[in-house]
Amino acid sequence: MNTFLEDILAQPAALRLTLASMLEENEAALEQAAEMIGGASRLVLTSMGSAHYSLAPVAYALSRLHPNVHLVETGEQMSLPFVPGTLYVIMSRSGKSKEIAGFAAVLRQRGERLLAITMTPDSTLAKNANLVVYDPAPYDGFICTKAYTSMGLIGMLIVSRLENRLDQPLVDGLGKAFDWMEAHQDAMLKQMQSIAWLGKSLTFLSRRAGMSLAQSGALWLEEAARRRAAYSSIDFFLHGPVEQVDEGYHGVWIDLAPDVLSRAQYREVAGKGGALICVGPEAAGPTGFKIPAFDLPEVYRILPAALPVQMIAYQSAAALGLRAGDMRYLNWVVR
């Protein structure tokens, strides 16, 4: 089996492992991370690549609790001034890519506070952090796949702990979501394989917490299928880029919490022609991937919804005769 596909299908088990770890052996670190965030006057969340997008729903959730939250790519953050009272939160699978390792070392030298979320506890990032929250999910063989969802889960759990909402109903809802992912992934892949036009350049559209998936979907498509991709919020798209929609347009519509406005927006875009893959609780039809809400907060719905979005990248590569994971310029994507 293709390595990328193996990683996609292995996510339910990896997410169960990560959740159990955060509730058991890593519970103290989770609690300390919530206390650090709650006590900081300013938060900077930073990473590179897919791990940066794993931080996006965390930033979305934190911005509703904290008055001073910034999500910045590490490459950009390295050139910005240091502000007193800032807690830096870095999320990285390897903890050793040049921007992450370099910035973590600078933070240590300056005496700045650093919270690290990583799959590599002996990495440069971890060694320079004040606190490490360890993600025990197995490494991916290709781009961040299990890492995207498992590290994102940890960040969301920290926020839920901060809100005092890491309770049994949330844990039960996550368990149901992971079971559903495992039970439906084969049928989902078969449905994806029936979409004849995959292999085209795509625009990923979403809103609110779902923007993390739109951003990651574009990245996965570009890395796996070497196709140009774009992402946009739905509202921004309707303020100009909608002009590109015609019979030759192909896109992915991700709506994790449909409401009256987003339903009207979908009808507006769909009515102009083109083809859309829809992902969310109300998606329907042959190119619709219905993802139950499981009574989970919107940010957590990213986890089961990641499955079809990743499959889009995999199947697009397959449609082009490419083996997803055979990279031309990189031996391994370390983010």
Image (cartoon, helix red, strand yellow):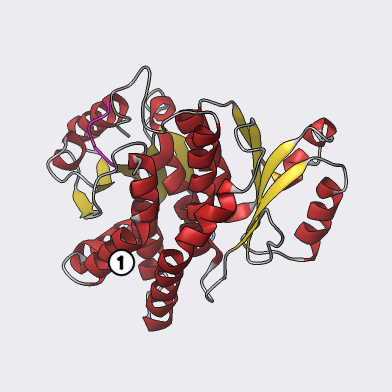
Q: Residue 243, percent across and down?
A: 84, 32
Horizontal side of 220 relative to 111 (left or right) equals: right
Kind of residue at disc 1:
Arg
Whether residue 218 is visible here, answered yes or no, is yes
Q: Image point 51% across, 72% down: which residue?
A: 296
Horizontal side of 74 relative to 197 (left or right) equals: left
Q: Residue 263, percent across and down?
A: 79, 60
Quadrant including the C terminus: top left
**Which image quadrant is residue 229 in?**
top right
Q: Image point 21% across, 61% down: which residue?
A: 29
Per the image, label 1 sits on a secondary structure element best described as: helix
Q: Looking at the image, is 154 positioned above or below residue 311? A: below
Q: Residue 305, percent across and down?
A: 52, 57
**Which image quadrant is residue 262 in?**
bottom right
Residue at the disc numbered 1 = 16
Whether residue 65 is visible here, answered yes or no, is no
Crowding at dot 1, Cα within 10 Å, few <14 / some 14-19 / many 20+, comes out as: some
Q: Is residue 95 magenta?
A: yes
Considering depth in this image, is 67 or 197 the residue closer to the camera? 197
Horizontal side of 37 relative to 272 (left or right) equals: left
- Span colored in magenta: 93-97
Report the predominant secondary structure element of the magenta stretch: loop
Q: Looking at the image, is 68 positioned above or below residue 204? A: below
